[in-house]
């Protein structure tokens, strides 16, 4: 089967689960499940691009187009993993070398031959701003038109759906920018969306079996004080998206319409048989998902 093309958004911020997720993404490309078209970073810190570029080089996938939201400097935090990752490699790519993530997404969509999938493991403002983008030198189409024409589906780690679809989670609720964008995205994104929520992966700790002193995922886990493993929000969403089928990946779905409150970031869910949104519920024991992620992380561990 032909690999599915994916555009991937990540906050690549303070948490180390994005690092584990990026390893899962590169692994899935090596398995010919997906092709990585571009990555958009939606939280902007000093070493964002250099550390991600360094990581992708070390994982054997140099040259991925990277965009960044240069304005997203207000999420706070100062993760040591990015500085350490950037220091130990040969990357010279900086934030300033990269275009705005919306332009990278617009170009990717405009050039895509077939419909692709969008994967998001961070904040939603780049996707919201993509929808709001007007025609430009890249394409006469608006962002909404490009997404409508070129996207199959959005897979997103966001929300807490554990209390019958009601809850609060960081990717939607972090700050006014993420709350407004999450609210806008749920109303205006034109394709189906599958959400994997906080409650699905919080108790599934992965990465703790990596023991190499030079492995970059292991180092990020140690830098985050999570050397015994970290909640698997982002790696589980990426693996689900790369598999591309909720049932095969070990989930059932609740279908309806998701909403995010613009003021509070709280998510809610109305169950509707023909709704465009779904959130996933595990159908297997936690150990099943943990083993799947840990096996992938270990398979690419640096000796
Ligand atoms: Ca993330």
Image (cartoon, rainbow, N blue to C red):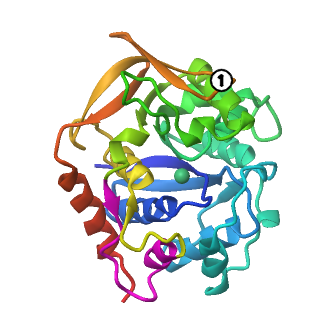
Ligand 1 neighbours mark 1 (CB distance < 8 Å): no
Q: Is residue 228 above or below residue 238?
A: below
Q: Is residue 221 above or below residue 243?
A: below
- Circle 1 crowding by C-alpha within 10 Å: few under 14, some 14–19, many from 20: many
Magenta stretch encompasses residue 224: no
Numbered disc 1: secondary structure: helix
**Circle 1 is placed at which residue position?**
184
For residue 115, side relative to residue 202 (left or right): right
Identify which residue is drawn at 37% across, 29% down. 279
Q: Is residue 207 above or below residue 69?
A: below
For residue 112, side relative to residue 98 (left or right): left
| Picture mark count | 1
- Residue 53 can be seen, yes or no: no
For residue 240, side relative to residue 146 (left or right): left
Identify which residue is drawn at 78% across, 53% down. 73
Res 128 → quadrant = top right
Residue 249 position within the rendered picture, expressed as x and y whole percent measured from the top left: 25, 44
Residue 213 position within the rendered picture, expressed as x and y whole percent measured from the top left: 43, 89
Residue 207 position within the rendered picture, expressed as x and y whole percent measured from the top left: 36, 69
Give the quadrant of the C terminus.
Answer: bottom left
Tell which of 56 and 222 is nearer to you: 222
- Magenta segment boundaries in residue numbering: 204-222
Identify which residue is drawn at 73% across, 79% down. 92
Magenta stretch encompasses residue 215: yes
For residue 26, side relative to residue 127 (left or right): left
Identify which residue is drawn at 40% across, 29% down. 161
Res 15 → quadrant = bottom right
Residue 203 position within the rendered picture, expressed as x and y whole percent measured from the top left: 32, 51
- Residue 288 can be seen, yes or no: yes
């Amino acid at each position: 089967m032909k690999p599915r093309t994916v555009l991937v958004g990540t906050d690549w911020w303070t948490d180390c689960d994005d690092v584990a997720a990026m390893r899962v993404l590169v692994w899935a490309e090596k398995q010919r499940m997906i092709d990585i078209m571009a990555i958009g970073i939606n939280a902007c810190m000093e070493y964002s691009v250099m550390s991600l570029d360094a990581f992708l080089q070390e994982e054997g996938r140099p040259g991925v187009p990277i965009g960044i939201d240069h304005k997203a400097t207000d999420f706070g935090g100062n993760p040591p993993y990015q500085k350490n990752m950037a220091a130990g490699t040969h990357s010279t790519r900086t934030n300033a070398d990269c275009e705005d993530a919306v332009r990278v997404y617009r170009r990717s969509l405009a050039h895509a031959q077939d419909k692709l999938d969008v994967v998001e493991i961070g904040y939603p403002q780049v996707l919201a701003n993509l929808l709001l983008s007007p025609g430009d030198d890249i394409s006469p189409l608006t962002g909404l038109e490009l997404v409508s024409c070129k996207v199959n589906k959005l897979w997103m780690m966001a929300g807490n759906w554990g209390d019958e679809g009601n809850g609060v989670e960081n990717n939607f609720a972090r700050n006014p920018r993420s709350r407004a964008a999450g609210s806008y995205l749920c109303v205006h994104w034109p394709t189906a969306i599958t959400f994997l929520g906080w409650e699905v992966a919080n108790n599934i700790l992965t990465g703790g079996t990596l023991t190499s002193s030079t492995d970059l995922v292991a180092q990020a886990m140690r830098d985050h004080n999570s050397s015994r493993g970290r909640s698997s929000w982002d790696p589980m969403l990426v693996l689900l998206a790369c598999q591309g089928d909720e049932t095969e990946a070990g989930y059932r779905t609740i279908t309806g319409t998701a909403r995010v409150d613009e003021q509070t970031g709280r998510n809610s869910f109305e169950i509707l048989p023909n709704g465009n949104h779904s959130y996933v519920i595990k159908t297997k024991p936690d150990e099943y998902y943990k083993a799947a992620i840990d096996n992938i992380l270990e398979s690419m561990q640096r000796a």
